[in-house]
Image (cartoon, grey):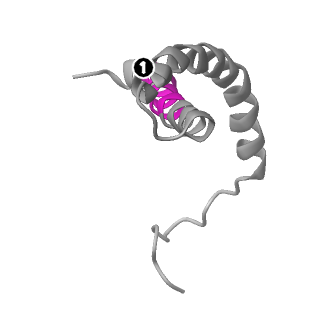
Amino acid sequence: MLTPRQAQLAFTPLVVIAMSAIISFAMTFLHHGLVPGLLQAWLRNWPVAFAVALPAAWLILPGVRALLARLTRVAPRGRGLGELG
């Protein structure tokens, strides 16, 4: 099991792995089409996408968190998520 700190540290790289895989596949497919060698082309492109996306995420996420913290208001006490009225 992971500690909360370990889970927090693992979150960004895991999301970047998934997102870079999906986006690099989509871009490779749009560029090459459904042709023989598509998988090989995607597997060449994916590491490049990951190498760009991970540092970008590390740079962008603190600013996004700070912005969302400024835009978030505290819910009134006594009301849970999904309660009406």
User: Residue 73 location in percent, x, y?
Assistant: 70, 57
Residue at 62% x, 35% y is 31
User: Residue 37 location in percent, x, y?
Assistant: 42, 24
- Please state, as top left, top right, bottom left or bottom right, where the C terminus lies in the image: bottom right
Per the rendered image, the range of residues in magenta is 9-21
Front-most of residues 40 and 77: 40
Q: Quick check: is 85 in the magenta stretch?
A: no
Residue at 60% x, 41% y is 30
User: Residue 8 location in percent, x, y?
Assistant: 46, 25
Front-most of residues 41 and 59: 41
Amino acid, disc 1: Gln
Residue at 56% x, 32% y is 28
Residue at 49% x, 71% y is 79
Extreme left residue here?
1
Query: Secondary structure beneath disc 1?
Result: helix
In the visual, does 42 lie left or right of 74?
A: left
Front-most of residues 9 and 74: 9
In the visual, does 33 lie left or right of 4?
A: right
Q: Badge 1 is on which residue?
A: 40
Q: Residues within 10 Å of mark 1 (few under 14, many from 20)?
A: few
User: Residue 6 location in percent, x, y?
Assistant: 38, 18
Relative to 13, residue 64 above or below: below
